[in-house]
Amino acid sequence: MNLPGYPFTPQRFEVRPGLSMSYLDEGPRDGEVVVMLHGNPSWSYYWRNLVSGLSDRYRCIVPDHIGMGLSDKPSDERYDYTLQSRVDDVASLLDHLGVTGPVTLAVHDWGGMIGFGWALSHADQVKRLVITNTAAFPLPKAKPMPWQIALGRDWKFGAFIIRAFNAFSGGASYLGVEKKMPAEVRRAYVSPYDSWANRISTVRFMQDIPLGPGDKAWALLEEAGRRLPEFADRPALLGWGLKDFVFDQHFLAGFRAALPRAEAHVWDDAGHYVLEDKAAELVPLIRDFLERHPLAG
């Protein structure tokens, strides 16, 4: 693969018997740990500019969730594509790496729910938050479900076109930004999803979105939303692109309400992939935030 801006050496971890997770572990082993969690349909490539901007000083741990990026892409028979599986995988990876001390949790898209799902049982480790266009609570009442998401979540035809034509990943590489991605960057985003089999997770992620108590992930999502204010005493940075048609101002307002002390950097000319549209501004802001809030001890 040609992966511009991604000069890293991915590593492998057998997160479950016979299934390997690809991940980055960049920066000094004794550096403060920053765990970066992507969502759907991106992968660790989303975080590349932040890794480059921090890894001289900070230890950056960035997994590709199973079925995504450079990780294995098993069938349904070999892997349960649910939110709980994602949370368990992150816990297994961090245990494997011996990360038992303080971490900064950086999240994007459904990585927010995965990260805060992990944080429910590791709250004492989470010392700082970097939150970009994501969710950690149920769909706000004022926010209708976008038809593009409902199509993939609830309709067989939608699932078919995603798997047959890479419609979700390909579409996101155009619609997720306000500043057009260079062609080679767009190709890097979509390259892991190059066949019907390799697109399974882009569909399963959507189908696992919980909207009510009958959905598998609902209890975990509801608990995360209820407990989110418990993290209000941690330093938090919100980096948000308002042109995101999914994680829009309704989600931003939810985080601001739960984390009223968070510093917010909001752009009305940035989209869902805010670290694409605003890397030149947001990466230095995140580094400055970390330096102004050093971890004790």
Image: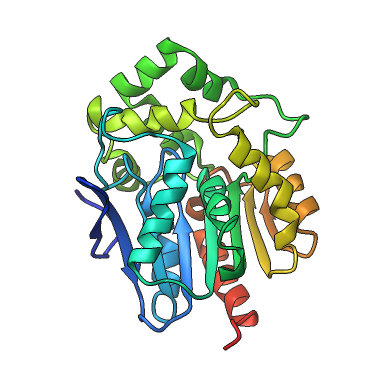
Q: Position of residue 156 (x, y in %)?
A: 42, 11
Q: Is residue 149 above or below residue 136?
A: above
Q: Height in image: 99 above or below 87?
A: below
Q: Is residue 79 visible?
A: yes
In the rendered image, residue 80, in percent from the top left (x then y), is placed at 37, 34
Residue lying at 55% horizontally and 34% vertically, measured from the top left: 217
Quick check: 212 left or right of 82? Answer: right
Picture coordinates of residue 285 (x, y %)?
60, 69
* Image quarter of residue 170: top left
Quarter of the image where the C terminus is located: bottom right
Q: Is residue 230 above or below residue 197?
A: below
Which residue does the image show at 25% across and 60% down from the upper left? Answer: 10
Q: Nearer the viewer, residue 206 or 124?
A: 124
Question: In the image, is 239 to the left or to the right of 262?
Answer: left
Residue at screen point 57% across, 58% down: 121
Q: Residue at x 67, y 36 (%)?
A: 138
Q: Position of residue 245 (x, y in %)?
A: 61, 33
Name the outermost residue toward the bottom: 297
Please tell me whether residue 122 is drawn above or below residue 211 in the rendered image: below
Quadrant of residue 202 within the rendered picture: top left
